[in-house]
Amino acid sequence: MTAENHELFTHIGKVLYSEEQIRQRVQELGRELSKDYQGKPLVLVSILKGGIVFLADLLRSITIPHVFDVIGASSYRGGTISTGKISITKDLDLDIRGKHVVLVEDILDTGKTLNLVLELINLHEPASLEICCLLDKDHPRELVIPIKYTGFRIPDEFVVGYGLDYQEKYRNLPCIGVLNEEHIHA
Ligand code: PRP
């Protein structure tokens, strides 16, 4: 099943990354993490909901033992621009104290979500905390978010697919692309 077979693919004006390009980059990130965390107690932590598609592929490309958990956070509330108001809807289930945590996120936009989630995770006192973010958007931001592992740097455009939504749709598209204007409702 390719992206072109998806009903919602016709809403995409420009594909930024194909399924194959994403697969290859995720494999590379998995190899890097497997090497860097060899012999260490690794916990991947992802952010609901967008991050879980990336997490699902990334964890299967990591060849060392590890566990994962999810945190609930949401900001966009259905639009294309961040409201800036982030709510935490779910905390960690696992005890990560003294463990090496990699925060797995789909996209860095204003940085407000990651900033808040980093604070929350640090309260749990991990041994280390790094970020693995699939998309780093070229968006002017005041917050400095240190990303150790980046998938792709993308232009400042509203993108969907591979977990990223517009009004909850498009998360199941295997590629990442920019929506046609006509499908964005003010
Ligand atoms: C999106 C995305 C990131 C966040 C990035 O989540 O998945 O978590 O926005 O934006 P920021 O850097 O400006 O904070 P959203 O709040 O839309 O929730 P979702 O993952 O459930 O779609």
Image (tube, rainbow, N blue to C red):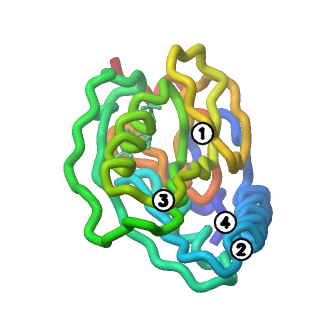
Viewer-side label of 3, 1: 3
Residue at the (28%, 62%) spot, across then down: 92
Question: Which residue is identified by label 3?
Answer: 172
Asked if disc 3 and disc 2 are in contact, CB closer than 8 Å, the reply is no
Question: Which residue is identified by label 2?
Answer: 34
CA distance for labels 3 and 1: 13 Å
Type of the residue with mark 3? Asn
Residue at the (50%, 61%) spot, across then down: 127
- The dot on residue 2 is 4
The x, y position of residue 135, in whole percent, is 63, 41
Q: Nearer the viewer, residue 55 or 97?
A: 97
Question: Which residue is identified by label 1?
Answer: 12
Indicate the secondary structure of the residue bearing disc 4: loop
Indicate the secondary structure of the residue bearing disc 1: strand
Asked if disc 1 and disc 4 are in contact, CB closer than 8 Å, the reply is no
Q: Earlier in the sequence, mark 4 or mark 3?
A: 4
Q: In the picture, which quadrant includes the C terminus?
A: top left
Is residue 181 shown to the viewer in this render? Answer: yes
